[in-house]
Image (cartoon, rainbow, N blue to C red):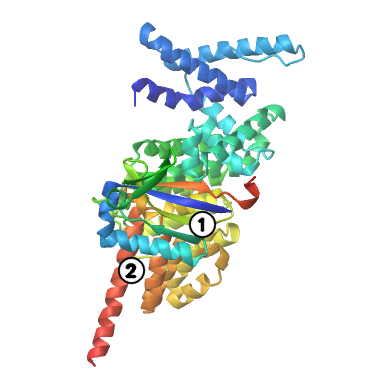
Amino acid sequence: MHPAELAARASYGRLLSILAVRTRDLVGAEDALAESFLAAVTQWPSDGVPQNPEAWLLTAARRRLVDASRRRRARDEKHALLQVSADETADGDFFGDERLRLLFVCAHPAIDAAARTPLMLQTVLGLDAARIASALRVAPKTMGQRLWRAKTKIRDAGISFDVTADELPERSFAVLEAIYAAYGSGWEDVAGRAAASRGLTEEAIWLARLTVRLLPEEPEARGLLALMLFAEARANARRAEDGAYVPLTEQDPSRWDAQRISEAEAILKEAARMGRVGPLQLEAAIQSAHLDARRSGARDEYAVVLLYEALVQLAPTLGVRVAHAVALSKTDGPANGLDLLDTLDPAQINDYQPFWSARAHLLEQLGRLDGARDAYDRAAGLAEEDGVRRWLLAKKRAVEGIAGASDASRGAV
Amino acid sequence: MRYALLVYETQAGVNERDDPEYQAAYKAYIKAIYEQGVAIGGSGLQDAGTTATTFRLVGGERQIQDGPFADTKEQLAGFFLIDVPDLDKALEWAARCPSTAKGGIVEVRPALEYSNRT
């Protein structure tokens, strides 16, 4: 990618936030910014790249916004005067806070919940609709329409850009969720060798840090930051040299990022001191327990089960309930874990790969090898990642090998 | 709603069909997609480069040619006809198709429903 293009990408979300917060019109701000990028592409090669490209782009976009506003005012005298102040400079912490403000606008309860995360990803993180659609696995056209509807609603319904302090906590859940989704899209792509997606996980971590600063009283913001840092610390250990998938229990702790882990531990402790537990803190605490167990060799399985029990109360997602059953199998035995798995709604687990992996693992421990083989096979059939699929098929072959060997010995007797 | 998942493979992908690991991945995928009542039909296809034959009428005259209709880098390697609630679900199944790990492509096409026809 060309350096100018990289710079443009990095600036997009920041510049758009500044423009949109001033004009309260995302669509208009996007158009103006697009025009200023276009002007840069044609002018910079001949005039040279300006010393502060962001400031140049911002000024050009503001000029276009003012022009557009004048044109509109000519048509409609009652149209509110555009408040584009030209005196702000394009540097400093100022940017970060505007990005976060836009994040909270995108989390407005009047905006379709399905559109909030993509809207934040696009406007604040500067991702294009096609990339968001791929990351969230939605058809690009559907995603485009969803984003367009949300943006026009912000403008036409007059959704306020003045997010007051008392509104922040209630919207913070949607914001945290969107940041986590942004992180997740980069996380899954670790296998996809896409260098660009690594940048996205870092953006998500950066936004979480900013959220912590803006919402110092919200322990869940810290919980999210800790959770992502724990995950990020293990990012490199998730793949073997040849790209094969390595599950947490087989990862080499020396390949983990110790600095990130200790930072995550410290942040999680800060959150815990606030005395208000939430799902993100619990997930981070579970990560902490897992990592600790792998490093020390000793493992407090009961603590993990208790954390999962609390998490099931607060956020009973399918993933949490499957993980709870696996955790329980370690304290109460695989049969009890399997019983818990079997309480899940068959319609929901039908095509849920982690369920079949977990089931296969528990059946294998119980020596029910035929069932384990079928479940590994089913999990492999549902896997999207080639590394995970290959790992599951290898497990299936291993189970077949044991079954075959015991059949043979029976035959000999 | 019915969709066709049209699986395109590169020649390299087609050449890897004898790889036992690749076969196991496909077996697992086919089993999963049929056992859940998602797939209604479909089949893998033999190598277009060596087995395809094309028929067309040119000026009212039958013309039978050796080789595929379009000589492209990727060839149609197989297809599934699936019945799922919406495009998002169809894309989920497309994402699971093992060919994509070998550089293959899955084209998702909504089927022409009877009521759509004039």
Residue A315, given in percent of the width and then of the height, sits at: 58, 57
Write the residue at 30% across / 58% down.
B22
How far is the residue under mark 2 from the one under mark 1? Answer: 27 Å
Residue A343: quarter of image: bottom right
* Vertical order, A187 against A3 (above or below): below
Would you say the residues marked 2 and 1 are in contact, meaning their CB atoms lie under 8 Å apart? no
Residue A354, given in percent of the width and then of the height, sits at: 45, 61
| Residue furthest right in the image | A78
Q: Give residue B82's mark.
A: 1
In depth, the one of A209 and A405 nearer the eye is: A405
The C terminus of chain A sits in image quarter: bottom left
Q: Is residue A187 visible?
A: yes
In depth, the one of B71 and A391 nearer the eye is: B71
Residue A126, given in percent of the width and then of the height, sits at: 49, 30
Kind of residue at badge 2? Lys
* Vertical order, B103 against A120 (above or below): below
Q: Is residue A105 visible?
A: no
In depth, the one of A142 and A373 nearer the eye is: A142
Instruction: Give the side of residue A256 with respect to residue A58, left or right.
Output: left
Secondary structure at badge 2 equals helix
Write the residue at 34% across / 27% down.
A1
Q: Which mark is nearer the camera, 2 or 1?
A: 1
Kind of residue at badge 1? Ile
Q: Chain of mark 2?
A: A
Q: Chain of mark 1?
A: B
In depth, the one of A76 and A107 nearer the eye is: A76
